[in-house]
Amino acid sequence: MTTEREVTTTIENEDKKSLNFVEQIVEGDLRAGKNDGRIQTRFPPEPNGYLHIGHAKAICMDFGIAENYGGVCNLRFDDTNPTKEDVEYVDAIREDIEWLGFHWGNIYYASDYFERLYQFAEELIRAGHAYVDEQTAEEIAAQKGTPTTPGVASPYRDRPIEESLDLFRRMNAGEFPEGAMIVRAKIDMASSNMHFRDPIIYRIIKVPHHRTGTKWGVYPMYDFAHGQSDFFEGVTHSICTLEFEVHRPLYDYFVDLLKKVEPNHPEGYRPRQIEFNRLNLTYTMMSKRKLLQLVQEGHVAGWDDPRMPTICGLRRRGYTPESIRSFIDKIGYTKYDGIIDMALLEHAVREDLNRHALRGSAVLDPVRLIITNYPEGQTEDMSFLNNPEDPNSDSHIIRFSRELFIEREDFMEDAPKKYFRMTPGQEVRLKSAYIVRCTGCKKDENGHVIEVYAEYDPETLSGRPESNRKVKGTIHWVSATDSVPAEVRLYDRLFLDENPSEAAKDKELAELLNPESLTIVREARVEPFLAQAKCGEYYQFQRVGYFCVDPDSRPDHLVFNRTVSLKDTWKKVNK
């Protein structure tokens, strides 16, 4: 347990920076001595899909609060719907949280509490606070009323307690088909809060559960399991997104009833629900249903497709845990929903990779450059810093030779006045090597440039005095003899529309997709240093962008994914 002195020290340290509103609430509770200075949070994902960047925001909040205030954050899987859940998702969620750099105190499952929740439901029936309803879903919806008109009571609302109790047990024993009956809490059909109008708390599901098998024939609804699970575990601050704000009174209602039948809890203890704004990003969809549709219809290669907003997709694309945490820290937490510009996330990863990514040379669309006055058969080893941003960075060797590959776009035969790259009669600097003057080119029968010619000045080797002479253009290169082939996957935004979720209301999902979200370059050339790259390593390809090694990569078939370009070109292209 955190001591009073530790709490005071933590708060004093936190006071040195601006606190978000959740931290202010937590500090207020600590100062008031609530829960004996104990802080306990939880991250409660449903194991029915892969986590996305929106979940990362919740993870940073739940684990961050516990970390900042000397508390503990537990991982709880909300596995109350066996029709959609799978162990595959459980494993993926654990991997994603650890990759983001967080560590849970304990792992729990809502299914750990199925027996206690079932007994609590029976207690509610016995106390006249719940009943079994045999109406159809359509009938129940029709009786719900509106926010300004009261609902209509179910004809089963005053069913005898023993009858409801018997039916509930028979529901669990499997006597009735799915949808035949449900259990509803008896609260207030005239409440202005629609969630209080006799909400469903149990339903029949005849699907084996991934942990409990066929032991249970009925399963609790989210609103009936969530707050009670928090209570069972001793959660002090139950932090969730804004759509659950209207559920909070129901959360408190069930917890208060539970306290009456669960005597073993500290005096005055009750978990406190706090809501913050969910993350919405431009050019991005967060709906699990829509993301599943993208996968099932083959618009993407899977949940870890680098164009997906899933954490595993971002990881495969080359996003770092540090960049995601930095982005979330910068956008903060409020009580107001809005849409965050995707450019902010891209800026965060550029910032992180600029500091940490190793530098290398890659030519994506190669054309051969022949330095006609360089001795045939001669080579020179040039030193390249692995990362100029890191003073402790090592260097590696790149070999210079008579024949090189340069980017096709770095040569233009008839160039405009302000074109400073390679064109006949103009000097250009070959990065970390020599200054050369272009002398011409060779074309095939279709007029396609197949070779570019230049002469070098031997006195302009990088580091020599003559290398300082003014030359406006600098281009990168790789040796034609030492470089190795590679496949490069150029990823871009998956959707063309800035708000695809809104646009999807009027258009088919396929109509919203960016047809150029993936371009595969199959004949790129990379320097030998990059041939040693391992899966998960990050690189800056000089003048091109930031890249990582894809899991598909093999020693005999290198595959790199573009994480992000060096600069934000999207806005310029889409003006």
Image: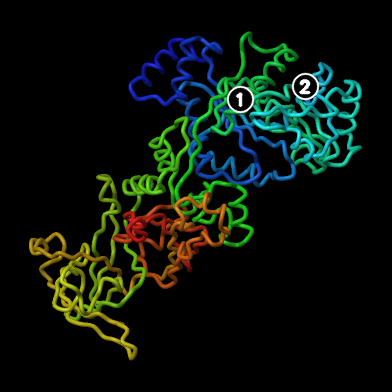
* Above/below status of 465 relative to 43: below
- Dot 1 crowding, Cα within 10 Å, few <14, some 14–19, many 20+: some
Q: Nearer the viewer, residue 392 or 105?
A: 105
Q: Is residue 216 visible?
A: no
Q: Is residue 53 visible?
A: yes
**Identity, as a three-letter code, of the amino acid under mark 2:** Phe
Q: Position of residue 190 (x, y in %)?
A: 70, 24
- Dot 2 crowding, Cα within 10 Å, few <14, some 14–19, many 20+: some
Q: Which residue is mark 1?
A: 248
Q: Nearer the viewer, residue 374 or 500?
A: 500
What residue do we see at 69% from left, 25% from top?
196
Q: Earlier in the sequence, mark 1 or mark 2?
A: 2
**Identity, as a three-letter code, of the amino acid under mark 1:** Arg
On screen, residue 125 versus residue 391, left or right, reads: right
What residue do we see at 72% from left, 17% from top?
258
- In what element is the residue under mark 1? helix
Q: Position of residue 455 (x, y in %)?
A: 16, 77
Q: Classify residue 110 by image quadrant.
A: top right
Name, please, the residue furthest toward the front: 149
